[in-house]
Image (cartoon, coloured by chain):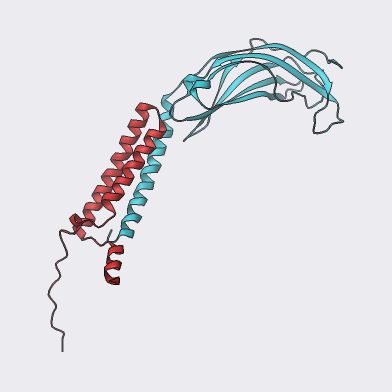
Amino acid sequence: MSNALAELAEGKIDFVGQNLVDQIAKVTLVAGGVISFVAGFALQDLRVTFSLYGAIVVLLALVVLPPWPMYNRHPVKWLPMAAPPS
Amino acid sequence: MHSIFARINNTSALLSSCMMALLAAIALSTLVFTARPEGNVSVASVQVYSGNTRRYATKRQDLAFVDFNITADFAPLFNWNTKQIFLYLQAEYNTTTGIKNEAVIWDRIIRRKEEANVNVIGKNKYNLRDLSTNFKNAPPASYSLKYNIMPYVGALTYGEAARTSEPVAFPPRKTRV
């Protein structure tokens, strides 16, 4: 029981998933910044910029932080246990 | 990125860098706006009385009272990065020894574009007095309306909106109203 809870809190994802998370975060934050700036500048309202960016960041957190199953599609293939040297 | 904590750590670091770049972009975007509003300042009258101020109530000195008329429109200065505009009316004159005196006698803070049209017929808010406690040797003063744009992000910028067309002299002192 406590093992399952600890695993849930850790939120482990495999390496391919980590790479994917990294890419998603980079693209979203930079593109989101550009889009928020352009939207705010066009409407001449600073609140538009920051509320749009805030919404993008919250969505990113929902996509990237929890250990979704799509990040665990390529688990590490461990070698079989070798016989201990006697 | 192996655990939730590691992902929070990495994404928040990237977020703060992006945020800094965004703020820098907002500050630089202000350079695009180059409005220079012009207005009008005229002084209706200047009167000099002998009086004292509240700080040292027994120190008699000359106090000048200025009635002025200001009209200006500061709406062009309001863009997305303008937090507020600080307006101030200055009396400027050089003493006989060549020292420049600039005294702010009136000011106002404008926070919204709707209240940016300024039409004030008023008198000085603050005491106008000379360091030598009298205006005997003070040459005629120019009154200038200046503004300070305070952005949300970026550098403070200053400008002058209006100036009296000719300097206005200080009359001789009167002892009673």
Residue closer to the observer: B160 or A83:
A83
Q: Is residue B81 left or right of residue B56?
A: left
Residue B12 drawn at (x, y percent): 36, 51
Residue nearest the viewer, comparing B142 with A24:
A24
Extreme residue in the front direction: A1
* Res. A38 image quadrant: top left
Quarter of the figure with the C terminus of chain A: bottom left
Instruction: Count how many numbered circles sit on residues in the image.
Output: 0
Front residue of B35 and B58 = B58
Q: Residue at x 33, y 46 (%)?
A: A58
- B70, above or below B51, in the image: above
Could you say where residue B120 lies in the image, as x and y percent from the top left? Answer: 62, 16
Q: Name the spot of residue B126 as percent of width and height, x first.
A: 71, 25
The answer to which image quadrant residue B51 occupies is top right
Where the N terminus of chain A falls, by quadrant?
bottom left
User: Is B36 left, or right, of B48 in this rendering?
Assistant: left
Q: Which chain has been coloured red in this picture?
A: A
Front residue of B169/A46: it is: A46
Q: Residue at x 37, y 29 (%)?
A: A41
x, y percent for residue B45: 73, 11
Which chain, by letter, is cyan? Answer: B
Give the quadrant of residue B21.
top left
User: Which residue occupies 75% across, 21% down?
Assistant: B95
Q: Is residue B160 left or right of residue B129?
A: left
The residue positioned farthest toward the bottom in the image shown: A86
